[in-house]
Image (cartoon, rainbow, N blue to C red):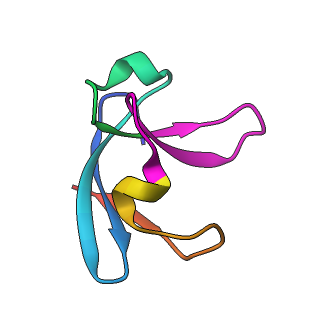
Amino acid sequence: MEPEDRVWVLVAGRRSRAVVGGTFADVPRGGLLVYVDSHGMLSLAVGGGNALERLGVEPGEVVGIVAA
């Protein structure tokens, strides 16, 4: 994945569009971001929001990410 790539985030049979980026500023308010965090882990965030609430997931739940 490269910055600005578009991907699908898959959770419990639902999918949401996301953008690959490096900072929260890479998405508009409410936009879903996929990024590598300070621990080198792939992470999700919502610009100005909460990814857990937006996606309706619980910590530890399986999430898939595929090319759009």
Res 13 → quadrant: bottom left
Q: Is residue 19 shown in magenta?
A: no
Q: Which residue is at a point 29% across and 51% down the rendered structure image?
A: 7
Q: Is residue 7 above or below residue 3?
A: below
User: Quadrant where the C terminus lies?
Assistant: bottom left
Q: Position of residue 44 (x, y in %)?
A: 49, 46
Q: Going by the image, does 15 lie left or right of 10? A: left
Picture mark count: 0
Q: Give the vertical position of 63 relative to 68 (above or below).
A: below
Q: Report x, y in % for residue 47.
A: 37, 30
- Pick the front one: 41 or 50: 50
Q: Residue 40 occupies which quadrant of the picture?
A: top right
14 vs 21, left or right, is left
On screen, 11 above or below 12?
A: above
- Which sits in the foreground, 41 or 48? 48
In the image, residue 64 lies at what x, y percent? 44, 69
The residue that appears at 28% across and 26% down in the rendered structure is 29
- Residue drawn 28% across the image and 35% down it: 30
Q: Is residue 42 above or below residue 61?
A: above
Residue farthest right in this picture: 39
Single out the residue that lies furthest toward the top: 25
User: In the image, residue 50 lies at what x, y percent?
Assistant: 46, 44
Q: In the picture, residue 11 is in which quadrant?
A: bottom left
Magenta stretch, residue numbers: 34-51
Q: Quadrant of the N terminus?
A: top left
Residue appearing at x 59%, y 48% in the figure: 42
